[in-house]
Structures are given as C-alpha cells and as structure tokens.
C-alpha cells in the first residue's frame, strides 16, 4: 500500500509548480491558493471517475496495461482508443512543459539568492527569461529520460517532492509560531484549522516516503544530493571570496 501511494503521488503532484511563477502573475495573493486547491480537487474527481469507468467496463482491470484506452475502445470503438491516445500525448506535453517551467525557475530563484552558482541567474537580454536555467533543466531532464526506467525516475521525483512537502509543512508550523511574529513576513494566505493541516501533511509525507523501496530511496537521494553539492560548492566559494 505504501509503494502504491508513492506512485500515486505523481498523479496528484505538480500543483506546487503554480507557485513558482507567481511573481509573474497579476494577483498571486488571491488567485494562487484557489488555483492550487481547485487543481487537486479537479484531478481527484477526474481520477475517481476514470477509475470507476475502467473497473466497470473491463472484465479485469489488473490485466490491462492501458486501461483507459482499452475501456474507450470497448464502448467507443477504435475512435475512442485513438481519442484517448491523442489526449494522453497532449497531457504529457503539458506536464513536461509545466515541469520545465518550474524546474528552470527553481534554479533561477536559487541562483538569485546565492544558493547555487550565479550562472543560473542569467536573464536573456531579449526574451527576459532565465535562458541558462531553462537549457540546463532541459539537458538534465533529457539525460534522465534516456538513462533510467520510467517507474524508477517517477519514484525519484516523488521522493524529492515529498521531502519538499514535509519541509514546507514543518516550516509553516515553525514560522507561524507566535514567537516569530514580527520577524517573518505576514502570511499571504492562512491555512484553516491552525496547525492541524501542516501537521497531518508532514506525517503523511514521511509515512509515504517510508513505504519506498531501497532503489527508489537511493535514486531519490541521489537527486537531492546533486542539489546539495551545488549549494555547498556555492557556499564554499562565497566564504572563500569573503
């Protein structure tokens, strides 16, 4: 069950990328929280409905490698299977594009705050985009896509996300404590029920990570270690210059 939950996170993950380009939006304070919540709710409804359809249409859903396409082929014919195939390609394209947008902005933000080399903070003089961060992210993504299995890379992505989720949840508990009042910026959005939701999110994130296999943890740890190496190298250079 833990391993299944680990893979399932990939289906729901990605909503956090919307917060990355928030500085480029018109009304991030009012729109961002609504967009994140509605994204998760919408995905949950669609996934549950798709699961109900496949389980009721297919005689044994566990024997199908492409259950949604197979279900569409049964009640819509070849045109239905083709429609699902085209929809999958469009969805994958959107996923990859969104991931590239988020990953490059992560690098840019880290570099802008001196957490990684300033090389990644370069802004293209004409397009005003972090071009070096975009090309670097694309190169790493291509290398990973050509070198590993989908399931293993998926697990690495999910483990990195869950560690981030756990860290953000813990930070919300700490930074919103009364003793930090006046020392940190006021919250743009306050989560209801006080510390309940961050506490539950923290525990659930760690519980799902605990269900990962050894190879999955190793790949996920390697991905995090790469970022740590960049951070430590930048810090050492900054200290040396100081």
Image: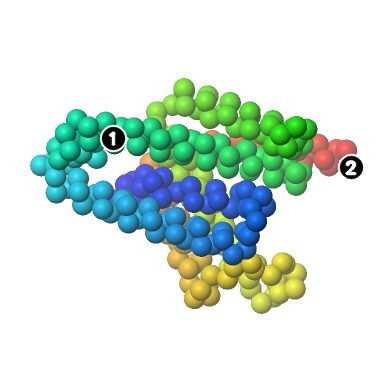
Q: Is residue 8 left or right of residue 190?
A: left
Give the image location of residue 128, x and y in percent.
Answer: 73, 37
The residue drawn where x is 38% and y is 32% is 89
Relative height, residue 2 to residue 96 (above, below):
below
Q: Secondary structure at mark 2?
A: loop
Can residue 104 be seen?
yes
Give the image location of residue 132, x and y in percent.
Answer: 69, 30
Front in this rendered view, residue 229 or 71 = 71
Relative height, residue 222 to residue 166 (above, below):
above
Which residue is outermost to the top? 146
Sooner in the amino-acid sequence: mark 2 or mark 1: 1
Front in this rendered view, residue 90 or 170 = 90
The residue drawn where x is 55% and y is 48% is 17
The residue drawn where x is 82% and y is 40% is 238
> Which residue position holds label 2?
242
Q: Secondary structure at mark 1?
A: helix
Disc number at residue 157? none
Give the image location of residue 20, x and y in percent.
Answer: 61, 49
Q: Is residue 151 left or right of residue 219?
A: left
Mark 2 vs mark 1: give the one in front.
1
> Which residue position holds label 1?
83
Give the image location of residue 40, x and y in percent.
Answer: 42, 56
Q: How many marks?
A: 2
Question: Around disc 2, counting alpha carbons within 10 Å, would you say few (fewer than 14), some (14 to 19), or many (20 or more)?
Answer: few
Can residue 225 be seen?
no
Which quadrant of the structure image shows residue 38? Answer: bottom left
The residue drawn where x is 58% and y is 26% is 139
Question: Around disc 1, counting alpha carbons within 10 Å, would you say few (fewer than 14), some (14 to 19), or many (20 or more)?
Answer: some
Q: Give the position of the C terminus as an image quadrant.
A: top right
Q: CA distance from mark 2 to mark 1?
A: 60 Å
Q: Is residue 42 left or right of residue 138?
A: left
């Amino acid at each position: 069950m833990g391993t299944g939950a680990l893979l399932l996170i990939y289906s729901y993950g990605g909503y956090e990328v919307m917060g990355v380009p928030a500085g480029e939006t018109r009304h991030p304070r009012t729109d961002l929280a609504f967009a994140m919540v509605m994204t998760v709710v919408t995905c949950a409804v669609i996934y549950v409905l798709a699961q109900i359809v496949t389980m009721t249409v297919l005689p044994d859903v566990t024997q199908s490698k492409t259950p949604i396409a197979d279900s569409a082929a049964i009640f819509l014919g070849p045109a239905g299977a083709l429609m699902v195939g085209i929809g999958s390609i469009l969805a994958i394209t959107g996923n990859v594009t969104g991931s590239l947008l988020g990953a490059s902005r992560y690098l840019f933000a880290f570099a802008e705050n001196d957490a990684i080399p300033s090389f990644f903070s370069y802004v293209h003089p004409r397009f005003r985009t972090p071009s070096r961060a975009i090309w670097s992210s694309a190169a790493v993504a291509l290398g990973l896509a050509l070198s590993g299995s989908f399931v293993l890379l998926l697990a690495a992505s999910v483990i990195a996300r869950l560690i981030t989720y756990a860290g953000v949840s813990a930070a919300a508990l700490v930074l919103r404590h009364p003793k930090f009042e006046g020392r940190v910026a006021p919250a743009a959005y306050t989560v209801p029920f006080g510390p309940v939701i961050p506490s539950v999110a923290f525990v659930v994130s760690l519980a799902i990570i605990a269900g990962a296999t050894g190879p999955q943890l190793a790949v996920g740890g390697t991905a995090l270690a790469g970022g740590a190496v960049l951070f430590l190298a930048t810090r050492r250079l900054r200290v040396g210059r100081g």
